[in-house]
Amino acid sequence: RRPKRVHQQHGGTCYAFAAAACVEANLCSIHGFESPSLRAMAHHLIQKYGSDGGHADEAVQELIRHFGLPLQSGSISKGKAEEAVMLERCIVGSFYLTGKEWEIFSTHFQE
């Protein structure tokens, strides 16, 4: 099996690709369900929310609503997140950085 080609993101679209990848991974576990493509889902989110960052949790909820997907979304406890991972389910985690923290974070990847 050939590895999937990695998408080169442009701008602040990581939220869209994280949400789409997680949804796609979870849909693949449903036998017989044909998932929308990762690109179609990410494109929908970028068209709706833009390319200047976004909230992955809101993006997942939008994908479920827009495509009528048989998934659930919402905040869960650390224990539930660990349980989901142990069951080989994909989850999206999110974080927030201040302007200064984002500068430090970004600098790390420029080196």
Image (cartoon, rainbow, N blue to C red):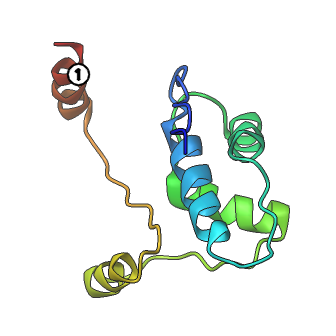
Q: Residue at x 62, y 62 (%)?
A: 23
Residue 65 in picture, x, y percent from top left: 78, 67
User: What's under tag 1, amino acid-wise?
Assistant: Phe
To which residue does mark 1 refer? 109
Which of the 4 image quadrants contains residue 103?
top left
Reply above or below: 41 against 6.
below
Reply above or below: 85 against 107.
below
Q: Residue at x 73, y 79 (%)?
A: 31
Left or right of residue 18: residue 84: left
* SS type, badge 1: helix
Q: Residue at x 51, y 48 (%)?
A: 18
Split into 4 quadrants, where in the image is the C terminus?
top left
Residue 97 in picture, x, y percent from top left: 27, 41
Which of the 4 image quadrants contains residue 94?
bottom left
Split into 4 quadrants, where in the image is the N terminus?
top right
Q: Residues within 10 Å of mark 1 (few under 14, many from 20)?
A: few
Count of marks overlaid on the render: 1
Left or right of residue 43: residue 98: left
Q: Residue at x 67, y 69 (%)?
A: 27
Left or right of residue 8: residue 45: right
Residue 13 in picture, x, y percent from top left: 55, 33
Left or right of residue 92: residue 70: right
The one of 64 and 87 positioned closer to us in this rendering: 87
